[in-house]
Amino acid sequence: MLRESAKHQNQPVNVVAITNSMLDPLLPAGRELIAFVDAIVLTDFDELPIARQELFDAAGPGAVTRAAAVCAGFEGTNRVVDAVGVPVNKRYFDIGDELGVTIPEHLKG
Amino acid sequence: MSTTISPSLTEVDPVAEDAVASSLDALAAPGSFFTGAERLAIAAHARVARGLASAAPELPAVIAEAARRISVDAITTRPEHIAAWEADGHDILSYVELVAVVALVTTIDSYRIGIGAELETLPPPTPGDPVPVIGEGAAKVNAWVPTVGIALAPTALSALPNESKHKAALGKPLYLADKVVHQYDVEPGRELSRMQMELVASRTSWLNECFF
């Protein structure tokens, strides 16, 4: 989705930053968003206040709320699709290669 | 667990708050196969698995294990787990209900964790027996469980329309309506741009080892 949006909106983005947090995603507050997501998903209560403050400083309170909301929504959806075996769409196989992740055989449909 | 409450670092989203409240009600209400008390017990087991609670009511082992696995290790699920569920005497659609319950409580909790709020105490169960509400034409198509039509992320719970509705009712206020998700040149007017939200979504999925 991110790559498609970048293409449609003619905006730069480094999608590899999704899997490599050393890289800059080239989006406003991109690094802060990644750190915030990491703290939520990993339930890292030491890092979370720091990451929240840094995202707040970079993008404001609405960004903190929305980032938490989007992350939370995908926390649920990820579990559903993996638990019921929704196969990965073939069109995502290429992006998997680009990001350096291997689509598990059991989800290739 | 402990969270640092940072309300000044967030904006209250009244639509999301309403959706969370409705979702808690849905967790506590009888479903198609589980009572409200059983659904809340499943949610409690999911919380314990994430380290967000210390105790949960007793459940049959196969149910408790499924709640744990889906809460923290969903990617390890295989068809064999579902076969074992059925071999233990449970309807495959009750597994779908369990998945829906775990997803709902996980979403609520992650949102609360993110905004720095305390987790809600799970509500008391709504009395009543489960009443199966099954999607017309639900059948195994391309997933491990029945769906109405092709199994995609938005239709993964479609065999149980009420569960599908509950998930959407929470998911849309948090992210985007399904019809907008793939309109890549449309900015949805949220506090983050579409691409920022997609970065959040992608990182979340990657951390969960999910390829959706």
Image: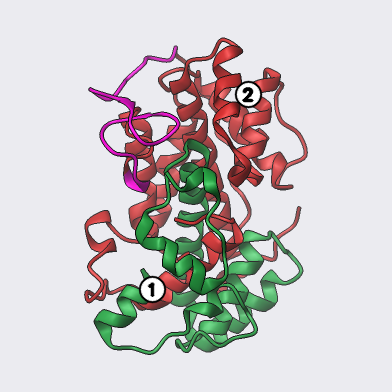
Chain colours: A green, B red
Kindly identify the residue that appears in the image at 41 percent across and 71 percent down: B197
Which residue position is annotated with label 1?
Answer: A2
Image vertical order of residue B99 relative to residue B178, above or below: above
Q: Which sits in the foreground, B127 or B160?
A: B160
Q: Position of residue B186 (x, y in %)?
A: 22, 74
Kindly identify the residue that appears in the image at 44 percent across and 44 percent down: B21
Kindly identify the residue that appears in the image at 31 percent across and 21 percent down: B134
> From the image, which quarter does the C terminus of chain B lie in?
bottom left
* Majority SS type along the magenta span: loop
Horizontal side, residue A36 vs residue B19: left or right: right
Whether residue B149 is in magenta: the answer is yes
Q: Which residues are magenta?
A: B129-154
Q: Position of residue A13 (x, y in %)?
A: 42, 85
Which residue position is annotated with label 2?
Answer: B63
Q: Please report, as a chain letter, where disc 1 is located.
A: A
Cα gap from disc 2 to disc 1, whole angstroms: 36 Å
Q: Nearer the viewer, mark 2 or mark 1?
A: 1
Q: Position of residue B209 (x, y in %)?
A: 58, 56
Image vertical order of residue A73 relative to residue B132, above or below: below
Any part of residue B36 in sight: yes
Residue type beneath disc 2: Ile
Any part of residue B10 in sight: no
